[in-house]
RNA sequence: GCCCCUGUAGCUCAGUGGAUAGAGCACUGGUUUCCUAAACCAGGUGCCGCAGGUUCAAUUCUUGCCAGGGGCACCA
């Protein structure tokens, strides 16, 4: 909030000095060193070209205007930079607002009516929830929480591919396993699923369904296929729930097909003259929309290519009244991005209203050795395994801590051993510590209901904490504008660090009741900021540890 | 061959068109009669992968190259 104020002041100063409206937001940074004040701007460098004056004289001129502002103790100019020394009253005013807001600090009311739909995970129902999908889950869920907290209307959705080829393959694989279990000769199809989890599943189904023996091959394929899709889907949703990831909507490919939406897409494309037939397959001219080559949407055997029902699904999203779509995909979908945007555009929507976020892969290693995971081949470490090993708080924190765009190396052994060093505990510990101090103060009979005198807070470490706390709303906005949840956990680590440092330097509960109340009030703002922040990434904020 | 991501301290990773590039881990030493030591304090490291270009200013933008990872189906 102080930053915004400085920004406004600069704009006004520039206007009154040179009679120009700044088109750009002046960049304001927190000063790297104390001698450069609290905040700095290098606006004079940016203006120097425009005004044909040297930066230093511009800075000096602006300084004289800015100086008169009662927010600052001092305004300095050093080598073209303008450095602001914010006075203590401004900080007291700022933290006063945080205290007023309490549990709702940084929360915004709904702004506008635009509805955002974020689709993520959408894993195939062919096995348990795996680690890569868990990363998408953590990212997507955190984004939704943060967007909604900051006044957007964002909804989460999971798309189930419960028809099509892979379901067929799953049925065939199950059938083969079923035969093998009964001592018959059978091979799992080449592209089928080989996981041990599937054997366990088929075993339990066949024990509970003796009629299987009376069915013919096709019937068994179908029966086991449908059964397993439902089973694995439920299992996945259950795992995600346990990971504190819930969905507003779950949409099945089957229902998209039943509503004949794929046919609608074909019709629409045909009307727009964007289809042609080649070697019995129907191709969509996606090159007209920037794709590298045209893509088949109906295969020569008459089946739909994956993109067709998916395009239909996006049509469905728009029909349900969403204005802006975000898809979070894994790195294996990167070639798919152009194609999907192309078809979205081709069926009549603004391609800017479909945003595709690609997160990078997760490499699982075990004592340095890479574990290659493949559901089809059957090497799997499931989300449930991970939670059992390191806990959901650590897992969620860890997944969101890395930037969406970077590859994530996850050493299972290390993660298990390093549990105690995991930064999530550092943050949670700060929260628990504050809770403990507050309990202690209550035991000492400090009346916390009485309004404290904040102006007694002026020590270096106190101001340091205040400065950090008031950054929080900006941090959340950064997360949103960059689509980068990792900014939040890193901020929480910094805030915790400032608090621990404060704690070791300054005693909160003392005989001075007035001062105690002021300090308790201060650390309460830290507590609620941590609580809100942790909650936004789906991590618990414990009262005790 | 084409496309995407990455290359910053011993390791894991932040960061920015601007002032002396940062954290954590690891390593060394210190801190508790007192609110949680899962904490704090002190100590030092960098051809910011390489080479051009744009700029008053490049680690940041851009081009080429090198290295690592991934993707390039009438799979989903």
Image (cartoon, rainbow, N blue to C red):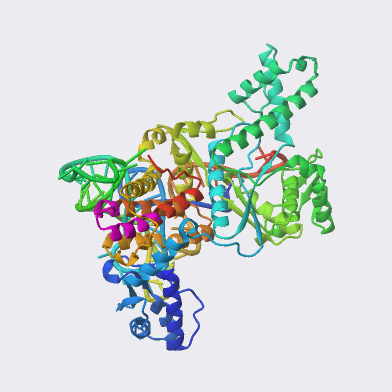
Position of residue A376 in the picture relative to residue A322 (left or right): left
> Quarter of the image holding residue B14?
bottom left
Q: Quadrant of the N terminus of chain A?
A: bottom left
Measured from the top left, where is residue A282 in percent x and y?
A: 80, 47
Measured from the top left, where is residue A189 in percent x and y?
A: 68, 26
* Residue placed most toward the observer, A48 or A69: A69
The kind of secondary structure the magenta stretch mainly shows is helix
Measured from the top left, where is residue A279 in percent x and y?
A: 80, 44
Position of residue B4 in the picture relative to residue A232 (left or right): left
Q: Is residue A503 found inside the magenta-colored segment of the image?
A: yes
Where A243 sits versus A268, above or below?
Answer: above
Q: Is residue A167 visible?
A: yes
Position of residue A246 in the picture relative to residue A535 (left or right): right
* Residue placed most toward the observer, A256 or A67: A67
Measured from the top left, where is residue B20 in percent x and y?
A: 28, 64
Residue depicted at x 44% and y 59%: A472
Number of on-image labels: 0
Q: Is residue A55 found inside the magenta-colored segment of the image?
A: no
Return the residue found at the far top: A183
* Residue placed most toward the observer, A493 or A175: A493
Q: Is residue A359 visible?
A: no
Q: Quadrant of the C terminus of chain A?
A: top left
Position of residue A389 in the picture relative to residue A181 (left or right): left
Q: Which residues are magenta?
A: A502-524
Where A327 sits versus A161, above or below?
Answer: below
């Amino acid at each position: 909030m102080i930053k915004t104020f400085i920004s406004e002041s600069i704009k006004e100063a520039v206007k009154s000095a040179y009679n120009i409206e700044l088109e750009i937001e002046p960049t304001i940074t927190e000063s790297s060193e104390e001698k450069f004040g609290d905040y700095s701007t290098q606006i004079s460098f940016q203006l120097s070209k425009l005004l044909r004056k040297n930066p230093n004289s511009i800075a000096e001129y602006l300084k004289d205007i800015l100086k008169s502002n009662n927010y600052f103790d001092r305004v300095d100019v050093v080598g073209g930079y303008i450095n602001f020394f914010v006075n203590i009253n401004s900080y007291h005013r700022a933290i006063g607002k945080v205290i007023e807001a309490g549990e709702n600090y940084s929360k915004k009311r709904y702004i506008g009516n635009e509805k955002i739909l974020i689709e993520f995970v959408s894993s195939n129902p062919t096995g348990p929830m795996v680690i890569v999908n868990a990363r998408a889950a953590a990212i997507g869920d955190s984004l939704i929480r943060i967007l909604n907290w900051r006044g957007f209307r964002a909804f989460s959705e999971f798309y189930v591919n419960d028809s099509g080829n892979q379901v067929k393959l799953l049925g065939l694989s199950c059938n083969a396993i079923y035969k093998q279990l009964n001592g018959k000769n059978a091979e799992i199809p080449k592209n089928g699923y080989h996981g041990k989890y599937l054997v366990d599943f088929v075993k339990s189904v066949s024990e509970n369904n003796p009629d299987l023996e009376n069915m013919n091959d096709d019937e068994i394929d179908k029966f086991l296929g449908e059964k397993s899709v439902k089973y694995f889907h439920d299992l996945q949703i259950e795992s995600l729930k346990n990971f504190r990831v819930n969905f507003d909507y779950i949409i099945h490919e089957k229902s998209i097909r039943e509503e004949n939406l794929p046919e609608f897409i074909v019709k629409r494309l045909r009307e727009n003259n964007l289809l042609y037939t080649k070697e019995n397959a129907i191709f969509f001219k996606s090159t007209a929309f920037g794709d590298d080559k045209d893509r088949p949407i109906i295969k020569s055997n008459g089946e739909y290519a994956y993109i067709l029902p998916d395009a239909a699904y996006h049509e469905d999203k728009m029909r349900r009244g969403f204005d802006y779509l975000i898809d979070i995909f894994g790195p294996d979908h990167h070639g798919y991005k152009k194609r999907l945007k192309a078809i979205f555009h081709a069926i009549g929507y603004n391609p800017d209203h479909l945003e595709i976020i690609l997160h990078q892969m997760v490499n699982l290693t075990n004592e340095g050795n890479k574990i290659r995971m493949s559901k089809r081949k059957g090497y799997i470490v499931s989300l449930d395994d991970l939670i059992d090993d390191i806990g959901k708080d650590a897992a969620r924190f860890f997944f969101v801590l890395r930037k969406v765009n970077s590859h994530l190396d996850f050493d299972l052994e290390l993660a298990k051993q390093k549990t105690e060093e995991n930064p999530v505990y550092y943050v949670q510990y700060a929260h628990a510590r504050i809770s403990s101090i507050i309990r202690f103060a209550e035991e000492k009979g400090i009346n916390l209901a009485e309004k404290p005198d904040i102006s007694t807070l002026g020590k270096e470490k106190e101001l340091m904490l205040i400065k950090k706390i008031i950054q929080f709303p900006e941090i959340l906005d950064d997360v949103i504008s960059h689509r980068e949840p990792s900014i939040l956990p890193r901020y929480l680590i910094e805030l915790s660090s400032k608090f621990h440092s404060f704690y070791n330097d300054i005693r909160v509960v003392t005989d001075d009741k007035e001062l105690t109340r002021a300090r308790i009030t201060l650390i309460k703002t830290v507590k609620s900021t941590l609580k809100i922040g942790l909650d936004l990434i789906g991590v618990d904020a414990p009262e005790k540890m």
